[in-house]
């Protein structure tokens, strides 16, 4: 055996595990089927701009252990995510806050905003109870995403800022989506535009690719190497495999295919310094085919690595789509049917004593970046006896 660990995938989960294994004195080989490291957080440089090739990634966490860990490998800037919603040319602040409510209804005080939301919620729930033959005092249990959202935020915000965006993102009507997708909605009766209610937030200076390079420093990496196509040979040169690819692909899809949503990007380099004045603008009407436009330079305040103003800009239009083989899988479709299928694959995975399944695809789970790091560190503690 040449290596203690073969790590399949150089995204966050794999890179963290590989780094910790190396620090524990283990021999490690990292492979990736893409021609670059960093998985979906890969950033490529274009005209001095760090472009998030596989969609915008804004690091945010409340976990101090994770923040202290990842800031060893990159200095983070102070970027605060404050997206804008564009509904047929009307612009609203996200998350829903006093700027949003003032634009929507003309209210000025938090009391007025809360009263308007409560009034709309109450009217809707009473109407739904009547449709179901329930009395006013009976409990109302939302049966789909539409009912859940309106019972949290009221009809106006739902119709303008949630419905169209969500239906484009999932490719399904809101009445066909499970209520648990929206467990809660961030509603702020303040003028706080910070989308993430997190203690720590920012973008790594120099881009995410540089951060992953630092994690993988001194570790052998082979790119453009497909593990599943070379499984037999690769398994022979390692004691254990850390697999971060799709769990159903590992087992040859023999129980069926897990579903994902995918995203297609249309990128443009524009010979102007400013396109939309914000890093992220969500298009919340259903008629606009893209879900949002990202203007990458604003993640780093329109400056290059030396602090100079960037004369050009790069934008990415994002189109949500149903995943099919060959597409990049982005978001697991965590409904009941796929959950049941994943459980069956997990049972198979638990029998593979030489393989650790981790990360968003390996665990069929929508993970934020901090949760991926925490999960990988937890596995390191178990596996490496740290």
Image: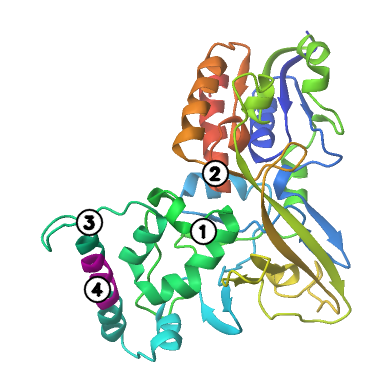
- Residue named by callout 1: 200
The image position of residue 64, as x and y in percent, is 47, 49
Answer left or right for 126 relative to 27. left
Distance of label 3 from label 2 (alpha carbons)? 36 Å
The image position of residue 91, as x and y in percent, is 56, 83
Answer left or right for 170 relative to 116. right
- Residue named by callout 2: 367
- Pick whichever, 126 or 279, lies toward us: 126
Q: Of the residues under marks 4 and 3, which one precedes in the sequence?
A: 4
Going 57% across and 33% down the picture, which residue do you hit?
Answer: 376
Q: Which mark's residue is nearer the viewer, 1 or 2?
A: 2
Distance of label 1 from label 2 (alpha carbons)? 17 Å
Distance of label 2 from label 4 (alpha carbons)? 36 Å
Range of the magenta residues? 119-127
Question: Does 124 lie within the magenta span?
Answer: yes
Q: Which mark's residue is nearer the viewer, 3 or 2?
A: 3
Q: Which mark's residue is nearer the viewer, 4 or 1?
A: 4
Answer left or right for 98 relative to 216. left
Q: Which label sits on residue 123?
A: 4
Distance of label 4 from label 1 (alpha carbons)? 39 Å
Q: Which label sits on residue 132?
A: 3
The quarter of the picture where the N terminus appears is top right
Q: Which element carries disc 3, helix, strand or loop?
A: loop
Q: Which element carries disc 2, helix, strand or loop?
A: loop
């Amino acid at each position: 055996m040449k290596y203690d660990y073969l790590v399949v995938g150089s995204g966050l989960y794999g890179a963290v595990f590989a780094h910790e294994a190396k620090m524990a004195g283990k021999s490690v080989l990292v492979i990736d089927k893409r021609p670059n490291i960093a998985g979906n957080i890969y950033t490529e440089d274009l005209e001095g701009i760090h472009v998030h090739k596989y969609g915008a990634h804004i690091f945010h966490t409340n976990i101090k252990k994770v923040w202290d860990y990842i800031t060893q490998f990159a200095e983070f800037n102070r970027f605060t995510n404050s997206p804008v919603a564009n509904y047929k040319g009307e612009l609203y602040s996200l998350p829903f806050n006093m700027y949003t409510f003032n634009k929507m209804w003309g209210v000025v005080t938090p009391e007025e905003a809360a009263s308007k939301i409560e009034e709309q919620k109450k009217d809707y729930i009473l109407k739904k109870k009547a449709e179901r033959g329930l009395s006013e005092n009976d409990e109302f249990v939302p049966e789909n995403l539409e009912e859940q959202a309106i019972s949290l935020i009221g009809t106006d915000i739902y119709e303008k800022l949630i419905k169209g965006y969500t239906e484009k993102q999932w490719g399904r009507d809101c009445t066909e989506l499970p209520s648990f997708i929206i467990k809660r909605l961030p509603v702020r009766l303040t003028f706080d535009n910070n989308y993430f209610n997190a203690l720590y937030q920012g973008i790594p200076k120099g881009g995410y690719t540089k951060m992953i390079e630092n994690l993988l420093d001194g570790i052998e990496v082979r790119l453009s190497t497909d593990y599943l196509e070379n499984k037999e040979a690769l398994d022979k040169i390692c004691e254990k495999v850390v697999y971060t690819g799709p769990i159903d692909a590992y087992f040859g899809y023999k129980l069926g295919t897990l579903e994902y949503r995918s995203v297609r990007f249309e990128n443009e380099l524009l010979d102007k310094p400013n396109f939309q004045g914000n890093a992220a603008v969500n298009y919340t009407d259903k008629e606009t085919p893209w879900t949002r436009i990202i203007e990458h330079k604003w993640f780093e305040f329109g400056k290059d690595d030396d602090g100079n103003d960037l004369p050009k800009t790069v934008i990415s239009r994002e189109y949500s789509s149903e995943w099919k083989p060959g597409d990049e899988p982005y978001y697991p479709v965590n409904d009941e049917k796929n959950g049941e299928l994943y459980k069956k694959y997990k049972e198979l995975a638990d029998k593979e004593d030489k393989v650790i399944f981790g990360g968003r695809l390996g665990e069929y789970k929508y993970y934020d970046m901090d949760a991926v790091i925490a999960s990988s560190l937890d596995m390191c503690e178990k596996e490496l006896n740290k």
